Amino acid sequence: ETSHLIAREIVSHSSSAARKKSERTASLILIDRTLDIGTPVRHLDNSLDKIYSILSRVSTNSYDLNITSDYLINNRDDLGNLTPVKCSFSHQMNQNTLEFIDDLQKTKGKEGLILIKKKLLEILKREIPNFEAPKSNGEITLVDQIKNYIDILKNNEMTVLKYSNTLECISAVIEAEEDYKCSKWEELLSFEKILPFSLAEINDNFNIVQQISEALNNLVQRSKALEAEEMPGFDIEDIIELVVFIYSILNSSFCDNEESFEMVKHKVLQTIIEIEGNRFVDAFELERFVTSIFDNIHYCLQSKNVLSFYQNDFSSLHNQTTVDSVIKTIATNIMNGDGNSIYSSSGNINKSGGYNPNSINYIPYGQSLTHFFSGIGRRRQNQPTPNQNDIIIFFIVGGITFSEVNELMEIGQEFNANIMVGSTDIATGKTIYSNLFEQNDINKTKK
């Protein structure tokens, strides 16, 4: 529905007059990834993907994050019982902060913390004459070093105000690193790196089910280990997201096998009960919830398999030890000029003209969306290439991860194109999870 709204809006501003290439023209590529349930649930090692998955948002319709001010404000008794100050990740950001976030977006793992440490050192050397960074021993972590630098800065309230936007962003990263969910994040990231390798060489459904069962058993053991360290273990959302990731990398023959599907569903229900214990009041309600989740997963997979480009070369995405995102795969093939041939089988080629109904839909050069949707003149047009314009706009319906934004930018550099990216949302596992479960939150049925 969102795709239709965007298309209608473009139609209302379009003209049928031919447009020549100029600095004011661009190629627009719309990708609806609603059925792509795999990439958003992955625990990507991008710094911004990590904090957007761990920290909660201000509201469901906001891109801003709930960030406490604990790291930036000294404890003061005179504040009394006043409501704690809330920080923001997105409001009133200056150009320097935007550039810092752009740099942070390109980092992975500990690279983000190293970048933050360097940024704080720059601020300290700029604001404190003759400042020398304290020597760190091997026992202190990067997070603790960063917190020590912030402690030095926050002794001067004017300095904190001067760099407040940047410091609030840094606080978000530190808060995510110290959140109990961070340890679970690292555990699930390890699971997702190993699973494609273990599933790649298995071709029969029974052994795939066994492999999934083993992965879920390992999840139970790791959850108990976390709880033994007095840390929260995995929860129902973690389990569902891992299962969705597994299904996203399996071939359609397994996903369409009803017996295998039921066996995995039963194992997932068993895993939830093992991890959650007797916290659910109504076992029947839990079973009904899991069944509805699997029904929705099955619906997404069936709907996706109807699309021609999933039926053909996109099947090569499955059972790969390295799983590229669908967005990266589509963008790479389009930029290579493979938009027509790679998604269609030779038996379905329309011999009477240049338009192939099984290829990615495109708007011929000089033609409006209204003419295209009406079917007029499709057959006699040569398919254009996005490179005919120096500016290429990718708009993703259904959300995009920061890792995918980086991939699109790298593709732009490779093809010497100016890439712009827009989306309806920042995609995380929560995005997909909320699409799969019913409005009634199953966690409300816990004791």
Image (cartoon, helix red, strand yellow):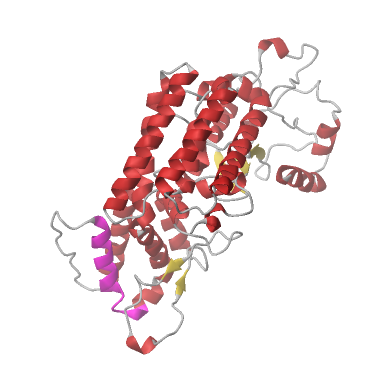
Q: Is residue 353 above or below residue 279?
A: above
Q: Indicate whether residue 156 is drawn in magenta.
A: yes
Residue 17 appears in which quarter of the rendering? Answer: top right
Give the x, y percent position of residue 135: 14, 61
Q: Quadrant of the N terminus?
A: top right
Q: Is residue 62 above or below residue 1?
A: below
Residue 87 appears in which quarter of the rendering? Answer: bottom left
For the point 33% across and 84% down, the residue is: 76
In the image, taking residue 247 as reference, residue 142 lies left or right, namely: left
Residue 46 showing in the rendered view: no
Q: How many marks?
A: 0
For the point 27% across and 62% down, the residue is: 146
Q: Read off the magenta span.
A: 142-158
In the image, taking residue 334 as reference, residue 172 lies left or right, namely: left
Q: Main secondary structure of the magenta part?
A: helix
In the image, taking residue 95 as reference, residue 15 lies left or right, namely: right
Q: Indicate whether residue 146 is drawn in magenta.
A: yes
Give the x, y percent position of residue 74: 32, 78
Give the x, y percent position of residue 204: 47, 16
